[in-house]
Amino acid sequence: MTRREFFGSSIGMVAASASVQPPQEGARQFPNVPGLTKYVSEFIASTKYRDIPEDVLALGRKSILDGFGLALAGSVSPMGPLIRQYVEKFVAPGSKSSIVGTGMKVPTRFAALANGVFIHADDYDDTQLSVAPDRVYGLLTHPTVPVLPSVFALAETNRYTGEDLTLAYHVGVEVECKIAEAISPRHYGAGFHSTGTLGSFGGAAACAKLLKLDTKRIANALGIAGAQAAGLRSNFGSMTKPFTAGHAAENGVVAADLASIGWTASEEILEAKEGWFSAAGGGFDPEAIMNRLGKPWTFADPGVSIKPFPSGSLTHPAMGEMLRLARENNVQAANVDKVDMGGNSAMMAALIHHRPENSLQAKFSMEFCMAILLLDRKAGLTEFTDPVVRRPDVQQLLRRVNFYVDPEAEKAGLNKMTSIIKIHMKDGKTIAGRAEFAKGHPANPMSYEDEADKFRGCAEFAKWPSAKAESVIQIVRTLEKATDVSKISAALTS
């Protein structure tokens, strides 16, 4: 039975949203997969650094560097001073975990929270790719943000090596992504923010690995993570979306810490009829996770996409194509009558802000993304700010963008981001283009140097010393050789 057949016969499951595929009739018992949580726990406990292929390690280095750069950029976001104000009340003597972009040292869980919020503040972090047409492209999880802040904060407390951090990071991302692939698409379609929910398991897996917990305690950590996992898509376009991501990282620290001292939880949290897959998704595909961890590693197949723009990933192919069309045809915004931008229904369901009034809403507005590229020919961190979003010329032009569901894009599948653009000029000319993928996708990957340039841009946006920024680039390039993470900490803090 294929995954599509499996989900098609399940009660009450939908694809990406109710408008995409209605619930199918017919009944099927909840999958009986005894030992699934134990299998995941054994993978976490037994995986060694040498088990990770070099190409996977190389891909991971880019995402790790990406995460650190975004933490710097996020530290100067509107959420920066607010999250610092919140966590400073928990500062305790002897705290060793750093808040990136500051000189603050706080207890581990709060550093994970703050740095997670920072990484996701600009919605510029990496995205997990889908493997089936019933999965919305790029919206399974943001894999790095729930994992990197938690293991970095924990690694600082005991001066773990770069190899230790790298191993824990990869284990956490792999567990998170395979759980995301397995859970019914109803989970996302019903409104859960999967980075917060599924990311909590990734953070817990990574921290449990770093603490070298045994299989039983790892299972307990996963059970504790399941009790904490939360996040709702209704909060997209607000500060609570980044909070959800940071909270997932914090959840991972708390779950592993509690399990390490003997706290108990369900040891079959994934497969139990009252457990995670049942409660949060109504079902799951056992073939997507059982005996699949590291076979292949998610970084290798289907891959992880690094974002070229600080906005929702579903905007990116269209943005890249719009930028190309504008440059090659010397399109002047004043001469544009209207823009038709056709995508699939999952894109429409996620990009909900058609008349954005601030930068957070603009990140989930196809209309803004098209307008700003026509006007400014760029869409970086500076463009996704409140003053730019509220500019009269931006607000006027985005109202001439028609974002709609195109049958051709819909037919291509939800695991793609087919974007069909038609720029209608006032002189009657029409300029057309189409894109499936964006720069940073495995089909059009960023090199380490490309990512280093993105990192430099984030550091510059944060007004971070260039010498410190360059040292992070070099340390992460050979992260596994670092004797401890203190050099990274020094380069990321004041």
Image: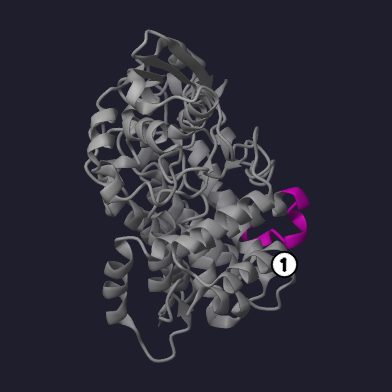
Where residue 243 sits in the image (x, y, percent)? 33, 57
Where residue 135 sits in the image (x, y, percent)? 47, 29
Q: Which of the two residues, 17 or 272, is positioned nearer the viewer here?
A: 17
Residue found 26% across the figure and 35% down from its top: 393
The correct choice, above or below, for 4 with respect to 207 in the image is: above
Q: Which of the two residues, 325 or 273, is positioned nearer the viewer here?
A: 325
**Based on the displayed image, in which of its 4 quarters is residue 106 positioned?**
bottom left
Under circle 1, the secondary element is helix
Where residue 494 sits in the image (x, y, percent)? 47, 80
The correct choice, above or below, for 159 with respect to 42 in the image is: below
Q: Amino acid at mark 1?
A: Glu
Q: Is residue 221 visible?
A: no
**Based on the displayed image, in which of its 4 quarters is residue 475 positioned?**
bottom right
The correct choice, above or below, for 136 with respect to 195 in the image is: above
Tell me where the magenta segment starts and ends, as one range.
42-55
Image quarter (top left, top right, bottom left or bottom right) of the N terminus: top right
Position of residue 280 in the picture relative to residue 380 (left or right): left
**46 within the magenta span:** yes
Look at mark 1 in the image and give the residue it sits on. Answer: 480
Q: Does the magenta stretch mainly form a helix, a strand or a loop?
A: helix
Q: Is residue 429 visible?
A: yes
Callout 1 crowding tier (Cα within 10 Å): few <14, some 14–19, many ≥20 = some
Residue found 48% across the figure and 58% down from its top: 70
Where residue 320 sits in the image (x, y, percent)? 51, 32
